[in-house]
Image (tube, rainbow, N blue to C red):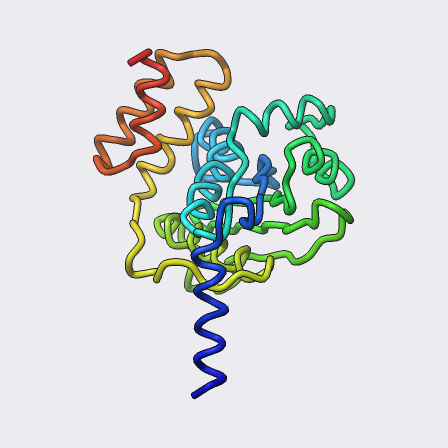
């Protein structure tokens, strides 16, 4: 009983950790390693959308602070890290130093006619060592239609890899339709390209598919200037 009580107190200490005790995590762009079965623009969108969605999931853990997109972009520019090539461990440490991150998450994805796989590398931002590679290797969780659940699983495994206790229970988290996630990703892609009109249209489609989607609503406000 005493051991259980101590364990519970230790967990509570992490869950209620002050901001300066949070683990700072930078989630970098993901590489498309070969995807087929959708419009190419959807796959281009997921390269920027997956890290944003994974970052949002990680940010729901009270022991994690995710580096914001603008700060991350500045850190990548400072470290001269390109989004058009594979981000290795050395590049990850450069970004971590510039962004003040303890850990960096990057990786790849592949969508083969609806069979979706994510491989995320958790990198120690100080040493450059790959702490762990996490994935949705279970064949029962590789359907593109399960993308929201796949992201949650990968997020949970990243949390475990950096030594934190589990976050909110899975059944208490949102389940966003894959169509909404795809349109949100397209919105981010168009926004990055400077096409605010197309970005706003994509964010609006994401909200139509899933009205309770704050990230899409924020994107719509940014691109419409509201």
Please identify the quarter of the rendering in which residue 206 is found. top left
Instruction: Please name whichever residue, 142 or 89, is drawn nearer the observer in this view of the structure.
Output: 89
Is residue 33 depicted above or below 156 in this figure?
A: above
Is the C terminus in the top left, top right, bottom left or bottom right quadrant?
Answer: top left
Please name the residue shown 49% across and 64% down the image: 165
Q: Is residue 208 left or right of residue 159?
A: left
Is residue 170 depicted above or below 221 in this figure?
A: below
Please name the residue shown 46% across and 86% down the image: 2
Instruction: Please name whichever residue, 91 or 197, is drawn nearer the observer in this view of the structure.
Output: 91
Q: Position of residue 87 (x, y in %)?
A: 70, 37
Please name the residue shown 57% across and 49% down the image: 23
Q: Disc count in the image?
A: 0
Q: Position of residue 181 (x, y in %)?
A: 36, 38
Instruction: Please name whichever residue, 147 or 133, is drawn nearer the observer in this view of the structure.
Output: 133
Q: Is residue 51 left or right of residue 169?
A: right
Camera sees residue 48: yes
Is residue 223 depicted above or below 17 in this figure?
A: above
Please name the residue shown 52% across and 29% down the image: 69
Is the N terminus in the top left, top right, bottom left or bottom right quadrant?
Answer: bottom left
Please identify the quarter of the rendering in which residue 212 is found. top left
Residue lying at the far bottom in this picture: please name it. Answer: 1
Q: Position of residue 50 (x, y in %)?
A: 48, 39
Q: Position of residue 123 (x, y in %)?
A: 68, 49
Q: Is residue 186 left or right of residue 108?
A: left
């Amino acid at each position: 009983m005493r051991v259980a009580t101590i364990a519970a107190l230790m967990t509570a200490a992490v869950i209620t950790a002050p901001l300066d005790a949070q683990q700072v995590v930078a989630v970098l762009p993901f590489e498309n390693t070969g995807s087929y079965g959708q419009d190419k623009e959807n796959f281009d969108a997921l390269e920027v959308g997956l890290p944003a969605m994974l970052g949002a999931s990680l940010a729901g853990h009270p022991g994690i602070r995710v580096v914001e997109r603008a700060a991350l972009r500045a850190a990548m520019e400072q470290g001269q890290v390109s989004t058009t090539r594979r981000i290795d461990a050395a590049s990850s440490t450069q970004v971590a130093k510039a962004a003040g991150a303890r850990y960096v998450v990057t990786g790849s994805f592949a969508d083969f006619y609806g069979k979706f796989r994510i491989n995320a590398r958790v990198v120690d931002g100080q040493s450059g060592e790959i702490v762990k590679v996490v994935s949705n290797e279970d064949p029962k969780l590789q359907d593109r239609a399960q993308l929201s659940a796949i992201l949650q699983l990968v997020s949970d495994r990243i949390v475990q890899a950096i030594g934190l206790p589990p976050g909110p229970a899975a059944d208490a988290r949102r389940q966003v339709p894959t169509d909404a996630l795809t349109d949100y990703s397209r919105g981010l892609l168009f926004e990055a390209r400077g096409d605010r009109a197309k970005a706003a249209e994509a964010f609006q489609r994401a909200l139509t598919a899933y009205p309770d989607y704050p990230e899409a609503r924020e994107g719509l406000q940014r691109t419409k200037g509201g």
